[in-house]
């Protein structure tokens, strides 16, 4: 698809292209604009993530905003039937939004119109996305680990806020070495066999807990393999593996920039569960990431005991949708909002959420039979 002439809004021209139609100058402008936002350098917001999603999602598009002959903004998205839009890589992308020059003002409805969208859905919208935050339905915490002062300083924080957790985890690491074999950690493993092991563990975990297996979806499976091969300063795939006697027992695949490691897919071999290999893995990831000059691990949206034990702070992300009045928006609302409200109702009631988790676990057990 070639570039069209675009739409002009108050002096800003908007042209929609496929990700692979972006020129080198536009990609570099994207990187520069992103660096100037002052937001954490989350790799999901870099052009490489969108470019890679474009290789596995044919409906991926980027709206490029031009002013005075210069690119001043980028809005990546996926377009579905009836103009229903989604954040790029929705379902696996942990940071979403537009990349805009400071001070650039474009009404979200006008941007959607230029993109041919009746609605745009997001579930991990950045907190500083002023264009879309007013349309958010809910706000969530995304726990983070601050290692900007080095790993030793982080351990001191853990000793103060989670002394039992740190002591127990380190003791399990020593016991693992004594009872199972030499413990070895690789921060950036390139062996595809280790990636396959991780994906198998994660698929089993999804089934065990009654959740949809993401790796059963071909586009996600392929996306992870492609990102494992991606090596750029703003977005690189990082596979971290904990070995015992050269056998992988826990692994994590995520994306990193120079200063942020975005945690994505952690899993472990259940045969070694009594040693808490996933927790050991996260401590070693934090240690190695600090040595690499990374200042923050973003653990991602969602409640989990291990996140509560490891975290030092949090970012905020939003879920919701921006809509443009019309029949398409009405159909979108009818298809999405009722289920979103049900999920919100359950999440806000711990006892009900507990019952829901029990039901999911039961489904997982039935699937395993």
Image (cartoon, helix red, strand yellow):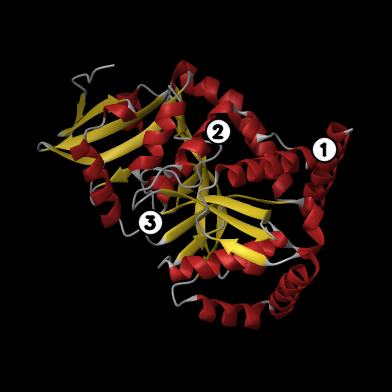
On residue 220, the disc is 2
- Circle 3: element type: loop
Q: CA distance from mark 3 to mark 2?
A: 23 Å
Q: Residues within 10 Å of mark 2 (few under 14, many from 20)?
A: some
In x, y percent, where is residue 331?
54, 20
Residue 248 placement (x, y as % from top left): 67, 53
Q: Quadrant of the N terminus?
A: top left
Q: Which residue is pictured at 28% across the width and 45% down the height? A: 100
Q: Residue at x 62, y 77 (%)?
A: 158
Q: Which label was assigned to residue 41?
A: 3
Closer to the observer: label 3 or label 2?
2
**Element type where label 1 sits in the image:** helix
Q: Would residue 66 be found to the left or right of residue 200 on screen?
A: left
Q: Gap in Å between the C-alphas at discs 1 and 3?
A: 37 Å
Is any atom of residue 2 visible in this view?
yes
Residue 369 appears left or right of 131: right
Judged from the image, the secondary structure of the residue bearing numbered disc 2 is helix
Figure quadrant of residue 98 = top left
Closest to the observer, 194 or 1? 194
Rendered image quadrant of residue 263? bottom right
Marks 1 and 2: in contact by CB < 8 Å?
no
């Amino acid at each position: 698809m070639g570039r069209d002439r675009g739409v002009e809004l108050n002096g800003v021209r908007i042209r929609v292209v496929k990700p692979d139609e972006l020129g080198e100058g536009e990609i570099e402008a994207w990187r520069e604009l992103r660096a100037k936002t002052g937001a954490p350098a989350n790799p999901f917001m870099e052009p490489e993530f969108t470019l890679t999603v474009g290789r596995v999602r044919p409906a991926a598009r980027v709206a490029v905003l031009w002013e005075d002959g210069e690119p001043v903004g980028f809005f990546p998205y996926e377009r579905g039937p009836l103009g229903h839009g989604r954040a790029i890589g929705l379902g696996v992308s942990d940071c979403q939004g537009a990349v805009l020059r400071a001070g650039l003002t474009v009404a979200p409805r006008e941007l959607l119109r230029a993109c041919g969208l009746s609605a745009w859905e997001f579930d991990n919208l950045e907190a500083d996305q002023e264009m879309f935050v007013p349309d958010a339905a809910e706000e969530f915490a995304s726990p983070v680990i601050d290692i900007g002062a080095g790993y030793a300083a982080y351990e001191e924080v853990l000793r103060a806020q989670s002394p039992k957790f740190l002591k127990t985890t380190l003791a399990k690491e020593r016991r693992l070495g004594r009872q199972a074999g030499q413990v070895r950690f690789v921060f950036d493993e390139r062996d595809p066999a280790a990636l396959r092991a991780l994906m198998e563990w994660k698929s089993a975990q999804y089934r065990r807990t009654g959740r949809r297996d993401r790796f059963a979806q071909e586009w996600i499976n392929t996306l992870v393999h492609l990102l494992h091969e991606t090596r750029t300063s703003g977005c690189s795939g990082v596979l971290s593996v904990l070995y015992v006697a050269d056998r992988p027992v826990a692994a994590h695949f995520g994306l990193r920039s120079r200063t942020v490691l975005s945690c994505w897919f952690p899993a472990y071999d259940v045969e070694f569960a009594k040693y808490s290999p996933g927790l050991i893995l996260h401590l070693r990831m934090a240690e190695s990431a600090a040595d690499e000059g990374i200042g923050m691990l973003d653990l991602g949206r969602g409640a989990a005991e291990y996140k509560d034990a490891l975290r030092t702070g949090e970012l905020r992300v939003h879920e919701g949708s921006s809509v443009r009045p019309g029949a398409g928006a009405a159909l979108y609302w009818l298809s999405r909002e009722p289920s979103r409200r049900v999920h919100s109702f359950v999440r806000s009631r711990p006892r009900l959420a507990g019952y829901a988790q029990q039901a999911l676990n039961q489904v997982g057990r039935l699937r395993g039979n």
